[in-house]
Image (cartoon, rainbow, N blue to C red):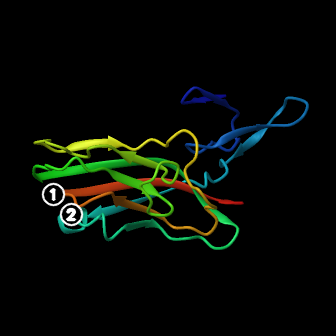
Amino acid sequence: NTNLNGIITKIGEDIPKEGDVLTWDDTNKQTGWVAPPPSGVKTIKVDVSIAQYQNLHSTRIQLVAAQGSGKTIVPTNIMIFAKHSGTETSSNNIYFGFNGSTTSGNYYSYVRDFMNNETRDRTYVADANTGEISQGSTDNRRFELYANNPMTGQIALTVYFSYEIKDI
């Protein structure tokens, strides 16, 4: 027998690859190793220029396109890296959602007073709201980043958005 990272294997047995899952039969006998099923979670990176940032109120940024009839986007994580080049003096908010609305019950998440009076780079997590996120179906809807009013700062963003596509 050999010991590989704390796993006992028999001579001649296949050595598992990192991430493999040990399988068992219904008599509790080890049957081998298999790769885990694909997660289904995808992560995309979206860079937002200073000009795009300043116009988020009028030109929304699509993070993920609509996926077709009977499909919805299920967000799992949103990380925002804000690169400061000039101070944001507004008290405006950035939003993530399906329909571009800033009305309560119509967005997935928002960051209040985004970068207001900050003088350095910042990192944010945009958590989901508890409760209603769309006053309508999210079937075949795109997922977007937008703002309630013009942003005034010299801020560039890098947004990492993790999500799954689900049948509804």
Disc number for residue 135:
none
Residue 82: where, in percent of width, then height? 23, 50
Q: CA distance from mark 1 to mark 2?
A: 6 Å
Circle 2 residues within 10 Å: few <14, some 14–19, many ≥20: many
Residue, x 61% and y 55% (percent of image)?
40
Q: Which picture quadrant has residue 22?
A: top right
* Quadrant in which residue 139 is drawn: bottom right
Query: Residue beneath label 2, please?
Result: 54
Q: Quadrant of residue 149?
A: bottom left
Query: What type is the residue that disc 1 sits on?
Result: Thr
Residue at x-position 27% and y-position 49%: 81
Mark 1 element type? loop
Q: Earlier in the sequence, mark 1 or mark 2?
A: 2
Residue at far bottom of view: 68
Q: Are marks 1 and 2 in contact (CB under 8 Å)?
A: yes
Amino acid identity at mark 2? Gln
74 or 105, which is in the foreground? 105
Rendered position, 44 above or below 88: below
SS assignment at label 2: helix
Q: Position of residue 51 (x, y in %)?
A: 19, 68
**Furthest residue in direction right, as rendered:** 27
Q: Quadrant of the N terminus?
A: top right
Q: Is residue 92 left or right of residue 41?
A: left
Residue drawn at point x = 31 percent, y = 50 percent = 93
Exactly how many numbered labels are in the figure? 2
Query: Looking at this view, is 23 or 56 the one in front?
Result: 56
Above or below 139: residue 133 = above
- Residue 42 percent coordinates (x, y): 52, 57
Q: Quadrant of the C terminus?
A: bottom right
| Residue where numbered disc 1 is placed | 152
Label 1 Cα crowd, 10 Å radius (few <14 / some 14-19 / many 20+): some
